[in-house]
Image (cartoon, rainbow, N blue to C red):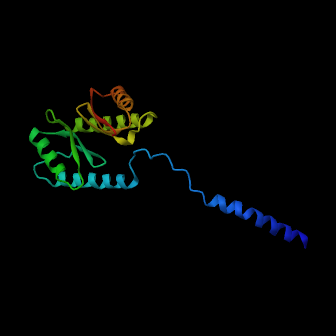
Amino acid sequence: MKTPFRLLALAAALLPLFLAGCGKTPEPASPPVATTTVGTEIDDSVITARVKGALMADPDIKSLDFKIETRKGEVQLSGFVESNAQVDRAMTVARGVEGVTMVENRLTLKGAETSVGTKVDDSILTTRVKGALMAEESIKSNDIAVISRDGQVQLSGFVNTQAQIDRAVAVARAVEGTRSVNNEMSVKK
């Protein structure tokens, strides 16, 4: 019977030390790094969907060759359009969407009409460039949109560093069928 009393006495002696340790306030954490949150990413996805919907619903914009990227409310429009009037209209429509804080114009004017064969070739080229970007470990390829037209590859989106932009352009240039690369990417702020 002496053993339980010794354990009880030991516990009573250690209890004040334990409680003293519990009363300490934790050290303040280092300030958080400015990044996007899940909520911000969801908000940006909603904004992107709204902008796409607004552009598709507008009768003056006849092109479906748009890529829309959004980061913290900043919308980047890229792709190919038929005229400067469509560029202006697309910018106006995008600016009118709730949640958009800024619109960046990365649109390119189309050249001559393309044939069905050229459109298929452009789809294959786009797929090849996307595959090459995905295979490159130094590039966060999910943040890069790729569109091709007549062998001209347009890269757009938001990436972490200028080095990623440079590498993405080099990778796209090396893909068979690429005649030129139009860099419309931006470094995340």
Q: Is residue 62 visible?
A: no
Q: Is residue 98 left or right of residue 41?
A: left
Residue beneath the point at 22% across and 46% down: 102
Given residues 38 and 52, the one toward you in this image is 38
Above/below status of 64 relative to 174? below
Total numbered badges shown on the rendered structure: 0
Residue sitting at the far right? 1
Where residue 4 sits: x, y (%)? 85, 71
Q: Quadrant of the C terminus?
A: top left
How far across and how far down the image is residue 94, in percent?
18, 49
Would residue 163 be seen by someone viewing this image from the given angle?
A: yes
Residue ID at (41%, 38%): 140
Residue 31 image position (x, y, % from top left): 45, 46
Pick the front one: 59 or 28 = 28
Image height of 174 relative to 56, above or below: above
**Quadrant into which the N terminus falls:** bottom right
Task: Return the residue nearer the eye: 73 or 88.
Answer: 73
From the top left corner, tell me how far across and down residue 177 is, in percent.
31, 28
Could you tell me which residue is drawn at 40 percent across and 52 percent down? Answer: 37
Name which quarter of the figure residue 142 lies in: top left
Q: Residue at x 14, y 36 (%)?
A: 113
In the image, 87 versus 83, the foreground residue is: 87
Q: Quadrant of residue 67?
A: top left
In the rendered view, would you say 152 is above or below 104?
above
